[in-house]
Image: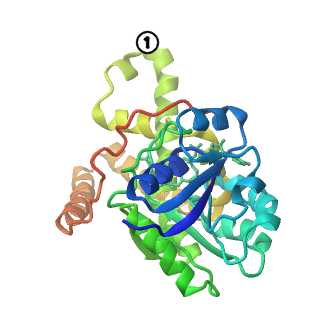
Amino acid sequence: MSIIYDRVALIGLGLIAGSMAHAMREGGLAREIVGHARSAETRRTAREIGLCDQVFDSAAEAVAGADLVVLAVPVGAMGDVAAEIAPHLKPGATVTDVGSVKQAVIEAVAPHIPEGVHFIPGHPLAGTEHSGPRAGFATLFLNRWWLLTPLPDSDPQAVARLSQLVRAMGAKTDSMEPAHHDLVLAVTSHAPHLIAYTMVGVADHLRRVTDEEVIQYSAAGFRDFTRIAASDPTMWRDVFLHNKEATLDILGRFTEELFVLQRAIRMGDGQQLHDYFTRTRAIRRGIIEAGQDTEAPDFGRTPGAAKAD
Ligand SMILES: NC(=O)c1ccc[n+]([C@@H]2O[C@H](COP(=O)([O-])OP(=O)(O)OC[C@H]3O[C@@H](n4cnc5c(N)ncnc54)[C@H](O)[C@@H]3O)[C@@H](O)[C@H]2O)c1
Ligand SMILES: O=C(O)C(=O)C[C@]1(C(=O)O)C=C[C@@H](O)C=C1
């Protein structure tokens, strides 16, 4: 494949930036990949494993002369990073981000982007519960969606070039309104993560009573919950604090449904439970029949690393 951006700067060197570095390198998509992370330990590890061609101690040095700058830090840190790099951006460069929330990131980042620099927010719908510079792998984005939420005045050519990079890393692209993105992700990702965190918390409380039985005999479904609940605490704290409204809306609806099912169990209403589960099974089967279950082959099974932030 051919070079799409000459110099790419990755700010934040964790799972997503690391996976981008591997994918871009494997595909020969950038002439030079440079990076910066806030913590000295992360920078040391990134240098040790050769994650980038160069790792800089400051974000300003990293973005100087870059054609593409990728903000791959927790959502709550995006605004500060944008303010720090703004004076050092090359005219004509593109800045994108990979944050799990879009509206709040746009509000925090866009005001800092200078005239003549393109800001195109994005979100790869791919991840694992692992974080840090050793967690990335080249196939993370294979067959996954990578949503772009361009601004009304985004330059179509800059958007097309970024889409080209995303597709060259194996992902599928689509565009979406930021507010709609945040609502969709509240349903498909953010609320489910909170439910998994809660369920593991409940089991943990119970463990004290039942002497480790819950964990020892945990079935596959609960194990999946524990995988999700092992996700990075900083990342998920920021997701919930920055997609507050949509997540609270979905959790409110979830609680109402939960009460309906809880009542059906209490009343012994087997018909209601059966009807409900028949409906949800049809939804899953519909997804599979439509060929929309695009789980990457090694999704979630790649050995990760402890986070060094
Ligand atoms: N993990 C996922 O499943 C996933 C999936 C899609 C999108 N995202 C989003 O991608 C972004 C990065 O997530 P990740 O999973 O790669 O996280 P990560 O924890 O693996 O990496 C984050 C990196 O950012 C660095 N960092 C933190 N604050 C910084 C700052 N102020 N300046 C510079 N560097 C800083 C950390 O040192 C670390 O290297 C987040 O916004 C997250 O919402 C994550
Ligand atoms: O680790 C996982 O399996 C994930 O949950 C990844 C996941 C998701 O919800 O699908 C998590 C957050 C992101 O913003 C995108 C992807």
Q: What is the x, y in percent for residue 175?
A: 48, 77
> Front-most of 148 and 200?
148
Residue 309 shows in the view: no
- The residue at the point 77 percent across, 81 percent down is 115
Q: Which residue is mark 1?
A: 211
> Image check: 13 left or right of 231?
right
Q: Residues within 10 Å of mark 1 (few under 14, many from 20)?
A: few
Q: In the figure, residue 79 lies in which quadrant?
A: bottom right
> Front-most of 258 and 65?
65
Give above or below for 145 relative to 41. Answer: below
> Image check: 285 left or right of 150?
left
Q: Quadrant of the N terminus?
A: bottom left
- The residue at the point 37 percent across, 42 percent down is 300
Q: In the figure, residue 10 lies in which quadrant?
A: bottom right
- The residue at the point 81 percent across, 58 percent down is 84
> Front-most of 25 and 157?
25
Q: What is the x, y in percent for residue 90?
A: 72, 70
Q: What is the x, y in percent for residue 169?
A: 40, 61
Q: In the figure, residue 96 lies in which quadrant?
A: bottom right
Give above or below for 259 relative to 82. Answer: above
> Image check: 130 left or right of 280?
right
Q: Quadrant of the C terminus?
A: top right
> Front-most of 174 and 219?
174
- The residue at the point 29 percent across, 34 percent down is 220
Give the residue type that dot 1 points to.
Asp
Q: Name the element at disc 1.
A: loop
Q: How many marks?
A: 1
Give above or below for 60 relative to 175. Answer: above
Residue 7 shows in the view: yes
